[in-house]
Amino acid sequence: MWHNDGVTDDSHSESNAFPSSLDAGDRENDAFGDGGGTKRRGAKSWGKGGKGGSKERSRERPAPKPLDAAALEQMALRYVERFATTRGRLTDYLMRKIRERGWDGGDGAALAEPGDLAQRMADLGYVDDRAFAEQRAAAMQRRGLGARRVAGAFREAGIDEGDAESVAPAIADRAVESALAYARRKRIGPYGSGEGDRKLHEKQLAGMLRAGHRFDLARKIVAAPPSDTPELLDFE
């Protein structure tokens, strides 16, 4: 049975494990990743004309066959088995693989419809945009990111307006807690020393706004005196 992995706090990737059928380009760099690769320590690199040269590698790695409807469906199933994802991301992934490998246009071959296939995965319960949105929002807010940043992540993940609206109340309920989590990390307001001039406070306020928090809430937290036990109600 296929299932989706949960979303971790650091996801601009959907999982840290990748199936052998997915190449490096398939790795989702969704959480502030730079998309860069690092050469494995100790790996050998053969010089020009040496053992394992380009001609030998090309013989060992034949070009993959163009995709057809059955192969595309298997690719989709492998993907949703390993990753928590959305219909939009799954559609983009399948479209990219078709561009890379081509489409089998033989007689009677069905046209590729990645969007329809992604919707079928959702109908079967293998993709759940609302659950993805709930998990992603909770993870981002635990890290101190506000509603605007969460909304941006939803757009990037292809979450539709209906699913985004369904989790909006929970996001709003955690707004103060999320803002205080950011303040705790950055030693702002109740978590600060109480020292600092107007310029510092403006910098702190700008940081909270970039993190996606409301202006009125951010200003109230920046202006708060140091406290060992700040109460959520003080910032409602």
Image (cartoon, grey):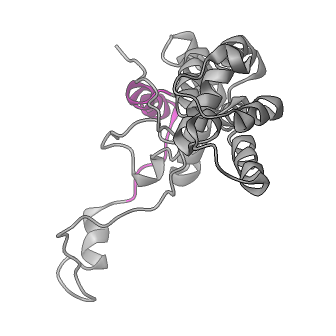
Work out whether 203 lies above or below 181: below
Q: Is residue 162 above or below residue 202?
A: above
**Image quadrant in which you'd find residue 159:** top right
Residue 166 shown left or right of residue 62 in the figure: right
Q: Image check: 49 left or right of 194?
A: left
Asked whether residue 79 is drawn in magenta, I would say yes
Residue 113 shows in the view:
no
Q: Is 125 situated left or right of 89 in this image? A: left
121 left or right, relative to 199 = left
Q: Which of 41 and 168 is in front in this view?
A: 168
Residue 140 position, x and y percent, is 57, 31
Name the image quarter holding residue 177.
Answer: top right
**Which residue corresponds to the image point at 53% horizontal and 34% vertical from the top-left?**
143
- Using the rendered image of the protein, determine whether residue 27 is visible from the camera's viewpoint: yes
Magenta residues span 63-84
Is residue 48 placed above or below 236 in the rendered structure?
below
Residue 47 is situated, as x and y percent measured from the top left of the image, at 25, 87
